[in-house]
Amino acid sequence: MGLIILSCSDWDLERVGFTQVITIGVIEVGANSAFLIGDIENIREANIVESGFVLSATAQEDENLRLDQASVIQVLSPGLDTISEDRAFAARATGLNGSTEYAFRAYVKIEGEEQVAYGNIDRFTTSELNVSLQSVRRTSEGCPTTAMVEVQVDGLAPGGSGSVGIVYSTNVDNLAPTVNNGVLVTEADTDASGLLSFPIPAECGESYFLRIILNPQSMNPIYSHAHGFTMIEGGLWTEKSPYLGLIKSGKPVSFAYGRTGYMGGGGRLGVTQNRTRVWTYEADEDLWAAGEEIDNMDLSESVSIVVDDKIYVGSGFAPLGHCGKS
């Protein structure tokens, strides 16, 4: 029995074409953006012509999460020069929907190969995005000036500030402006709490109608309900939540205690509903709520005073024997 050993001084190892793509994971997940990370292993002098990620909120299986599927979002890496020495690459997906689960995977295209190399499927869920108009303030006295529209954003990932903007109009026939018929503002100052401050050139005596907009650069941006403010010499009026009670005739009564406002009475002529109910307004939340009813007392045309920690209401359309309540 003999042993034969063959040797070769010129093995062509460079012809091995196996490429493994790994979906590393995701960081900085916000309401409409996420930072995706991938990696490449086992490449033998291959020339990468494209790297990126595919993701979808509907396609969950391998055969559906591919570049040629209609429901898939393609996110390219910024450039081939951004691939690190250890073959890692990344890209930020933007324009996503809040509170939504996405399946995603990394991919690369190799020069001279028809097939796209895909990584494993991973998943993430975007957070809920809460956006609210906090205030409108002027930066200087007199006119013209700059009105700073301050918008509080909770759930926005780092680097995702371009996903929120405002659009405004000064046309009274355009109370709910869009990007097509209003002025879009996306540049804003931001702080660590998520407060965005959008500047608007403001003139005295002018009224401004605005809406917060999400994903302003996308084909289907999302708009908030309309807000408004009016510039007057020496001050600035801003629109708050509408009063929910009935005021069609009569004179309502109103008063304030601390950070809470109260209003009642003044219902429709011939209608007694809500004339006995006091509505509350919470200034910090810009929110009206139905409060308690004052039994057997019509609040219309009443007067009110606040003494220490008590509120006194009376002299309205009260039945005999009910001249006041506290």
Image: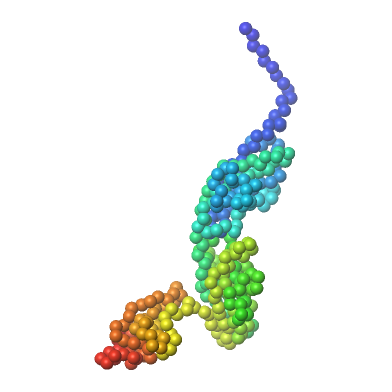
Q: Quadrant of residue 258?
A: bottom left
Horizontal and vertical percent for residue 248? 44, 86
Q: Name the residue: 59% across, 45% down.
A: 64
Q: Name the residue: 64% across, 8% down.
A: 2
Q: In this view, does 141 lie to the left or right of 273?
A: right
Q: In which quarter of the image is residue 259?
A: bottom left
Residue 143 versus residue 62 in the image, above or below? below
Between 82 and 16, the one nearer to me in the picture: 16
Q: In this view, does 217 lie to the left or right of 281?
A: right
Between 201 and 299, the one nearer to me in the picture: 299
Query: In the picture, which quadrant includes the C terminus?
Result: bottom left
Q: In which quarter of the image is residue 281?
A: bottom left
Q: Is residue 221 left or right of residue 314?
A: right
Horizontal and vertical percent for residue 200? 62, 75
Furthest-top residue in view? 1
Q: Name the residue: 60% across, 64% down.
A: 221
Residue 70 versus residue 183 in the image, above or below? above
Between 201 and 167, the one nearer to me in the picture: 167
Query: In the picture, which quadrant includes the N terminus?
Result: top right
Q: Name the residue: 54% across, 55% down.
A: 29
